[in-house]
Image (cartoon, rainbow, N blue to C red):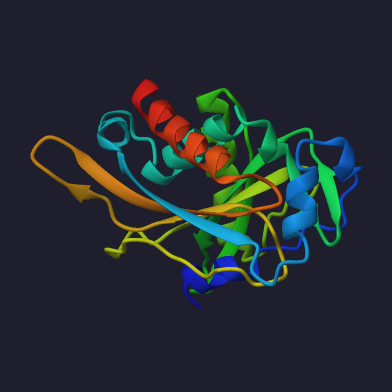
Amino acid sequence: MSDFFYSVKFIYRNFVEKMIEVNPAETSRAYAFEMWMKSPMPMVTFFKTLDVSRLVRLSLKKGFKFNMLMCWCVGRAATQIKEFYMLPVGDRLIRYDDIAVNTIVSNNAGEVSSCDIPFSDDLLAFNTDYLRFSRQVAESCENHDITDKMVIGTSALAGFDIDGVVGMYSGIFNNPFLIWGRYRRGWLKTRLTVSFQFHHTQMDGAHAARFLDLLQKEIYRL
């Protein structure tokens, strides 16, 4: 099973210990909740081409995994937007205190498994968790799921040239997620096109566009 299709099977974040149900009418998402919670297709997808030259250089010079650096920048950008801390779950709106970033791992059985990494603002700490949990998942062939954080899904198809993905809504989970393929080297810059899908109840287009802009800025800051 490819990691592309595996991402559709993202774990449904329902049985969590630390999530807090909020009254949508008392939040900034009140109108969106009324408009989109019962929509047959509430997901929206944005595309953006990023300059990832900095990540490629860091990967080559410092030995960091490119995918880890992307996941860390995703987490950094998301923590700056409050809408990422609320998620529609079932027919409720849930607020989380923290964020995690999911990555898809090739396991020792020749399949793929899901691995949630708790986000840390400390790059070295996040890298340690990324390596530890992804290795654990690869060896055990068992998912590592974090249920008390708002999880952002990612799926890296690094071996393929793709321009984006749409229509990934499964009706099972509402988590935002990003998909990217192989980065493309140019004379001056290395570029990577990402697709970002989100539930319209969770955020509006302006929030998503700001997130993608922040993602690029975080890449530049590394």
Residue found at x 83% / y 46%: 94
> How many numbered circles does the render carry?
0
- Give the residue at the far left of this rendering: 187
Judge by depth and name the residue closer to the eye, 219 or 115. Answer: 219
Q: Position of residue 164 (x, y in %)?
A: 38, 61
Residue found at x 88% / y 42%: 25
Judge by depth and name the residue closer to the eye, 202 or 133. Answer: 202
The answer to whether residue 96 is left or right of residue 54 is right
Above or below for 26 versus 15: above
Above or below for 62 versus 135: above
Residue found at x 55% / y 69%: 168
Observer able to see residue 65: yes
Q: Position of residue 58 (x, y in %)?
A: 31, 30
Above or below for 52 versus 202: above
Q: Position of residue 52 (x, y in %)?
A: 30, 38
Judge by depth and name the residue closer to the eye, 117 or 216. Answer: 216
Above or below for 116 versus 28: below
- Give the residue at the far bottom of this rendering: 1
Which image quadrant for residue 8?
Answer: bottom right
Residue found at x 82% / y 36%: 27
The answer to whether residue 204 is left or right of residue 74 is right
Observer able to see residue 99: no
Which corner quadrant holds the C terminus? top left
